[in-house]
Image: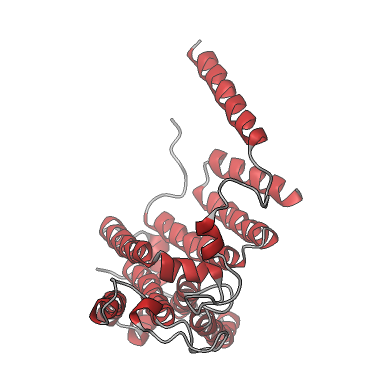
Amino acid sequence: MGCLAFLVVCAVVVARTRDLLAATVVFAAYSLVMALVWQQLRAPDLAITEAAVGAGITSLLFLLAIGRTRRMEDED
Amino acid sequence: MRQLGATALLVVAAAVLFATLAEAPPFGWQEAPTRNVITDRYLAPGAGETGVLNAVTRIIFDYRSYDTLGEATVLFVGVAAAVVVLSGRTGRFAVRLAGGSDDPVLQTVTRVVVPLVQVFAAYVITHGHLSPGGGFAGGTMLGASFVLYLFVFGADRARRKLRPETGEMVEGGAAVWYVLVGLGGVLMGASFLANAAAGFPRGVEGALLSGGAVWLIGLGIGVKVAATVANLFLHLTGED
């Protein structure tokens, strides 16, 4: 239950923040906890993939994409 | 006024969704309508007709192998699109990442960690039919170990370890390998991507070399995903 609450808070923070770098870090934390939840739901295959792809590759990809564009979202 | 209407609409939609959820069968209920002859056959305990112990791998590389072939294609197209969109502009941050790091702590830790990650990735790829994981998860780890090397030692050294042309060749070759294994089924008188029906040896249940075509396909997918990840980051940190 605590894990699920953490996921909801993370999701809201990712959606609300204007700092894309911070959003990426929070999103990685979301994926890591999501991997724990998959494990608890007895889906170890998904847990491994979520940890490798969600927390690892996706975050690095976002990081590089931010590096090539802008860090802050526009105010409009 | 418009915002009020939208909020009301959302509340109604949420109420409908929660009402539906309340009527849903409980988690893991044996009598659920979704549990029928298909589920029972796919999730039968033991290696069964495919020779694959891991039920997830059994489904994605045998029963639903055709879907996975499409998935591999989606991956390829996605990477191609990302490279096209992002490779033109190089920000300062990306250049700094591509330059690597001089930090001795980072470099030493990377030297120790990368081989360990790669051994574990090889284990996950080759044991996909026995334990959790498989080609996709293991391939991602293998690719991630290369990305770690790239970020710490810089794009130039990483390019010497794996030239982009070689990476592209490996990626395309692994996709062709998947199709060839599938055509092997046709050649042996069964359907495309057939496994046990085509006479691929199922092997001893629980042995490393078992599962027939599933093992071969898993190996191909592992190599392909690793090459995909490595290629993507090589392109995004390069000058071209």
Which residue is nearer to you in this view: A11 or A65?
A: A11
Q: Position of residue B73 (x, y in %)?
A: 30, 64
Q: Which corner quadrant of the image does residue B94 belong to?
A: bottom left
Looking at the image, residue B192 sits to the left or right of residue B137; the answer is left
**What residue is at 37 percent from the left and 77 percent from the top?**
B197
Looking at the image, residue B189 sits to the left or right of residue A3; the answer is left
Is residue B171 in sight in this rendering?
no
Looking at the image, residue B92 sits to the left or right of residue A33; the answer is left
**What residue is at 56 percent from the left and 79 percent from the top?**
B130
The outermost residue toward the front is: B37
Looking at the image, residue A7 sits to the left or right of residue B73; the answer is right
Is residue B47 in sight in this rendering?
yes
Q: Is residue B154 above or below residue A7?
A: below
Which residue is nearer to you in this view: A44 or B26?
A: B26
Q: Is residue B83 above or below residue A73?
A: below
**What residue is at 41 percent from the left and 58 percent from the top?**
A67
Which image quadrant: the C terminus of chain A? top left
Q: Position of residue A61 (x, y in %)?
A: 44, 61
Q: Position of residue B22 (x, y in %)?
A: 67, 34
Which residue is nearer to you in this view: B69 or B121?
A: B69
Colouring style: secondary structure
